[in-house]
Each structure stands twice: as C-alpha cells, then as structure tokens.
Image: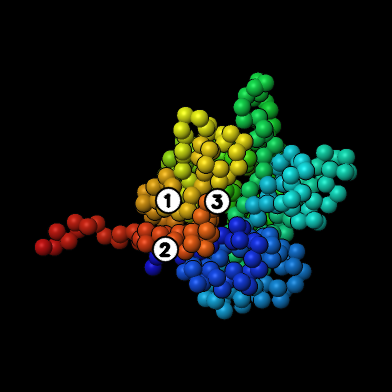
C-alpha cells in the first residue's frame, strides 16, 4: 500500500477547516496535516474540551480524511527566538500576552511559548496523533554571518540555550508518547546537516526529537536532500513534499536580496511540487531505503500559481511518483528458471 498523501493546512488557514476538509477531498488528498492556527486545530480548546477532539475527528472521517500529525511551527518559533514585534503577528494572543511591554526582553513570550508546546503534546495525545511538526526558533540565527567576528562560545551558548528550553518540553512529549519533528529550516537551531548533528548532540540524541523532512529548505542552500535522509535515517518522523528552484541570474543573490517570495528578481523561490529543482524520484527511493512509511504531506507554496490548481496537481504528482519498496530482488527468479 502506498503512503497517504496529505495536505499541510498552514497555508490554507484563511479557510475554515469545515470548508478545507471538503475541498481537500475534492482535490484528491487522503488526509490533512492540521495546523495549530486558524480554526484547524486549537490547542487550548483541545485541552479544555474532550468534545473538541471528537468533533474534529468526526469532521475528518465524514470526508474520509486521515490525520497523522499536527503542526505547531508558529508557537515553536517563539521558544528560542529573540522576540521582537514580528512575533506578535504569528502568535496566539495568550502566548504573546504583554509582549515586549513587560520590560523582560520577551522572556515571558519565550516561556509562554514553551508552555504552549507542552500543551500541544498533550493535545496531540488526546487527538490520537503521535507527531507534532514545528520549529524551535534560534537565539543565534542572527549570528549566521561571522562579522563582527562571532566567538565559538556564542554559538555554543546558543545550542545550550536550545537544550535548556526544549528538554523540559520534550519531557512532556515523552510522557505523552508523542514525538516532535523539527522542520530543518533557516531561522531554526538546525538549518543544514552540520547544525542538525549539533542540535541532536545538544539534547543527548533523545528519541522524542526528530525531523519533518522538507527538501525545499535544503536545496537552495546547496544541500542534497537525499544526503539528509541518509544522515538521519532513524529520525525522519514526517515528510513534507515541497519544491523550490534556484534562479540565480548574475544579479540576484542566494540570500533573497530582501525581495519577497514571488518576486521574479529573487535568486530562489518555492514552486508547486514537481515544477522546481527537487529530485523527488531520488527522495522516494531514499525514504524507501530507510523504511519511512508515514504520510507524504504536500506543503504547497507557489506565489505565482493559483493554489487550488497547484494543490491538485501536486497531489496527483506525489501519488503518481510514490511506490512501494521491492520485497524481492528483480533477478531472484533467475535461480528458479
């Protein structure tokens, strides 16, 4: 049986989940990866009301939709970030709270975000999913380019701060039997293979922490996504099918030139699945090699394409591309001839 193809709902949070559930089935998806924003999956309601998670499951089942994971990227980002006014636009009001007005430099936001991530694990357990995808944030992302010179001690402290913030969260994940899957991504504590190794070392390689593999964030950095799978074969807890393309023309740079996504002058951008530079054929083969049998979740982003058109074609592309691993060598029958 092929892996279920699901839709990550984060980019569709403007639609009520009732409407998106119907639409997703019409587009051909087998399920939804519910985002913890909009009304798609509300952690506070899931914690407070047993009827909430049942109603959510009933809704999905009425459209013959599965759910294998929920996503908490926005709150997770605020756990380790140095908080500024941008975070207000992505956080629930109860997590933002008094924001920067308390004079604590955003430490209160960090703490409330950490508590919300603990509750997200509890809500996932109640809902019956064992993976929460998300971000960690990073207190050292702004030190990416080492000028003024960055001492190694500053980087070491950043990874230590990550461990200090996330170990108590992961303790709750362990209690709930839920795993956290970091989407390795610029602005996170891990954004490439080397920093991913370092993040795992910082938390003692605990099993509650793995990865939501997303090739689109690796390819434009020059990283082979297949090598990521091979580097962390037992840590691929979820998979995003998302595409990107590098379009350097001698004028633009790989850092984006302070141009928004969708601007044709950028040096790279996201594309509808199958229309960028990601080699999904090799990714499917690598996932088969490491025994990944979870969902393939389309996180659809393409600023210059109609999203319903793009989501439908992406779903069709992934279903056509996916295949089961062989259970016998192709030439094994020769010996019996």
Is 69 positioned to the left or the right of 244 in the image? right
Residue sticking out furthest to the left: 337
Q: Residue at x 80, y 42 (%)?
A: 106
Q: Residue at x 48, y 59 (%)?
A: 310
The quadrant where residue 153 appears: top right
Q: Which residue is mark 3?
A: 303
Whether residue 294 can be seen here: no
Q: From this view, report whether residue 145 is shown above or below residue 176.
A: above
Q: Are marks 1 and 2 in contact (CB under 8 Å)?
A: no
Q: Position of residue 100 (x, y in %)?
A: 84, 43
Locate the C terminus by quadrant. bottom left
Residue sticking out furthest to the top: 149
Q: Which mark is residue 17?
A: none
Q: Which residue is mark 1?
A: 275
Label 1, residues with CA under 10 Å away: few <14, some 14-19, many ≥20: some
Q: Position of residue 292 (x, y in %)?
A: 44, 56
User: Residues under labels 1 and 2: Cα distance?
Assistant: 13 Å
Whether residue 136 can be seen here: yes
Label 3, residues with CA under 10 Å away: few <14, some 14-19, many ≥20: some
Q: Which residue is mark 2?
A: 316
The quadrant where residue 148 appears: top right
Q: Position of residue 27 (x, y in %)?
A: 49, 68
Q: Position of residue 158 (x, y in %)?
A: 68, 34
């Amino acid at each position: 049986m092929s892996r279920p193809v699901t839709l990550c709902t984060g980019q569709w949070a403007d639609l009520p989940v009732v409407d998106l559930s119907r639409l997703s089935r019409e587009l051909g998806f087998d399920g939804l990866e519910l985002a913890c924003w909009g009304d798609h999956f509300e952690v506070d309601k899931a914690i407070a009301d047993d009827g909430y998670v049942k109603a959510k499951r009933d809704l999905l089942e009425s459209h013959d939709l599965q759910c294998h994971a929920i996503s908490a990227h926005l709150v997770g980002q605020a756990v380790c970030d140095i908080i500024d006014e941008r975070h207000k636009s992505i956080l629930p009001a109860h997590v933002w709270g008094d924001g920067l007005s308390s004079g604590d430099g955003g430490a209160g936001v960090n703490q409330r975000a950490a508590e919300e991530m603990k509750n997200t694990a509890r809500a996932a357990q109640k809902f019956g999913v064992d993976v929460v995808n998300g971000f960690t944030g990073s207190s050292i992302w702004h030190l990416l380019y080492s000028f003024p010179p960055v001492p190694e001690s500053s980087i070491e402290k950043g990874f230590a701060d990550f461990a200090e913030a996330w170990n108590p969260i992961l303790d709750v994940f362990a209690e709930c039997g839920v795993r956290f899957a970091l989407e390795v991504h610029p602005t996170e504590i891990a954004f490439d293979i080397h920093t991913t190794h370092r993040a795992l070392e910082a938390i003692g390689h605990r099993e509650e922490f793995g990865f939501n593999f997303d090739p689109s964030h690796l390819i434009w950095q020059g990283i082979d996504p297949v090598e990521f799978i091979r580097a962390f074969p037992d840590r691929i807890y979820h998979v995003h099918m998302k595409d990107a393309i590098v379009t350097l023309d001698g004028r633009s740079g790989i850092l984006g030139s302070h141009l928004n996504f969708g601007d044709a002058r950028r040096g790279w951008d996201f594309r509808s699945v199958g229309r960028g530079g990601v080699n999904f054929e090799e990714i499917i083969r690598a996932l088969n090699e490491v025994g990944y049998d979870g969902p393939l979740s389309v996180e659809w982003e393409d600023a210059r394409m109609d999203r319903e058109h793009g989501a439908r074609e992406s779903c069709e592309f992934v279903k056509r591309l996916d295949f089961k691993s062989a259970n016998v060598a192709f030439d094994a029958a020769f010996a019996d001839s």
